[in-house]
């Protein structure tokens, strides 16, 4: 049983342990549950109380004892629907707070290969044209299967792109796969360990390493500054 899935639903580790034990037992006293789970009886009571509030456990009085009963696992879906309903009820207020916040630069950090894919997919979804400078080699090296897919999706979405690469990357297969207009500069002017992408009002800085990092800055002023820098490089780059 993947307990992590239950944890993602908002159950604590103690609640998960008690709930799974009770599913096996079907019905039991708190003492029996505590013994079966290998936890203190007080902790079992606390977890049972919370599970009852969540509708995942019921109870009955049998003579002088309280017997706890596991409800149908289908109740997990009901519990999830209740949580979704609660979130929906506060969304209007949360949106008011979000809109009312003062303007400032948003910075988001994405870690790992899937994090980088999120950045690229969001760019494709926006269909925004963009400029970039940095390493194509590292992109292909770290995301070898995704690189050609991304280039193909750019063409399908009619996303136009200008790229500045190091002179020593000219003629490389991965540069030939690049969909867009490419120019080249001497390697000392192009960072081979990162790629910077400018798509107003965003700037995405990708740091290529084994566990890559992507930093997305949402700011028209910052984007404009990087745009001017790119145009200066572009004017001096060679085709």
Image: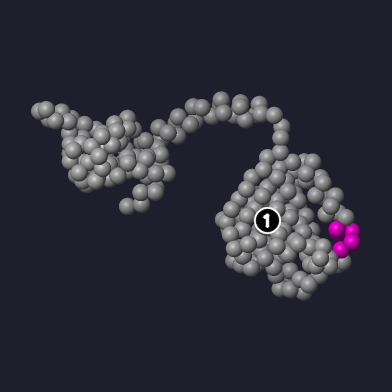
Residue 222: horizontal and vertical position, in percent? 78, 44
Q: Measured along the vertical axis of the image, is residue 101 above or below residue 217?
A: above
Tag 1: Cα neighbours inside 10 Å, few (<14), some, or many (≥20)?
many
Q: Nearer the viewer, residue 77 or 6?
A: 6
Query: Does 158 lie within the magenta span?
Result: no
Give the magenta part as a residue range: 233-237
Left or right of 185: which side holds 83?
Answer: left
Q: How is the image coloured?
A: one colour
Q: Measured along the vertical axis of the image, is residue 193 above or below residue 171?
A: above
Q: Residue furthest left?
A: 63
Residue 203: horizontal and vertical position, in percent? 73, 48
Left or right of 167: which side holds 76?
Answer: left
In percent of the image, x 71 and y 59: which residue is there? 194
Q: Measured along the vertical axis of the image, is residue 55 above or below residue 124?
A: above
Q: Secondary structure at mark 1?
A: strand
In percent of the image, x 35 and y 49: which residue is there? 3
Residue 130: horizontal and vertical position, in percent? 76, 53
In percent of the image, x 80 and y 67: which residue is there? 187
| Residue on which the image places disc 1 | 206
Left or right of 221: which side holds 81?
Answer: left
Res. 136 in view: yes
Q: Measured along the vertical axis of the image, is residue 70 above or below residue 86?
A: below
In percent of the image, x 32 and y 52: which residue is there? 1
- Main secondary-structure element of the magenta-colored stretch: helix
Residue 64: horizontal and vertical position, in percent? 11, 27
Q: Quadrant of residue 234?
A: bottom right
Q: Nearer the viewer, residue 207 or 123?
A: 207
Res. 121 in view: no
Q: Quadrant of residue 238?
A: bottom right
Q: Nearer the viewer, residue 2 or 194?
A: 194
């Amino acid at each position: 049983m993947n307990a992590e899935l239950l944890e993602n639903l908002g159950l604590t580790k103690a609640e998960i342990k008690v709930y799974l034990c009770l599913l096996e037992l079907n019905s039991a006293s708190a003492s029996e549950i505590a013994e079966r789970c290998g936890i203190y009886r007080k902790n079992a009571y606390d977890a049972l109380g919370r599970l009852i509030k969540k509708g995942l456990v019921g109870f009955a009085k049998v003579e002088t004892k309280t017997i706890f009963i596991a409800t149908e696992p289908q109740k997990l879906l009901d519990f999830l629907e209740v949580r979704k309903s609660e979130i929906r009820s506060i969304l209007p207020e949360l949106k008011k707070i979000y809109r009312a916040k003062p303007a400032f630069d948003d910075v988001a950090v994405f870690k790992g290969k899937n994090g980088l894919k999120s950045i690229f997919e969001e760019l494709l979804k926006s269909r925004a044209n963009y400029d970039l400078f940095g390493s194509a080699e590292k992109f292909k090296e770290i995301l070898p299967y995704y690189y050609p897919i991304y280039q193909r999706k750019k063409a399908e979405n009619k996303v136009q792109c200008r790229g500045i690469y190091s002179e020593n990357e000219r003629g490389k297969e991965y540069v030939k796969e690049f969909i867009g207009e490419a120019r080249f500069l001497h390697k000392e002017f192009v960072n081979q360990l990162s790629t910077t992408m400018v798509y107003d009002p965003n700037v995405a800085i990708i740091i290529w390493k084994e566990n890559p990092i992507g930093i997305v800055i949402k700011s028209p002023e910052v984007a404009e500054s990087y745009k001017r820098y790119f145009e200066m490089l572009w004017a001096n780059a060679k085709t």
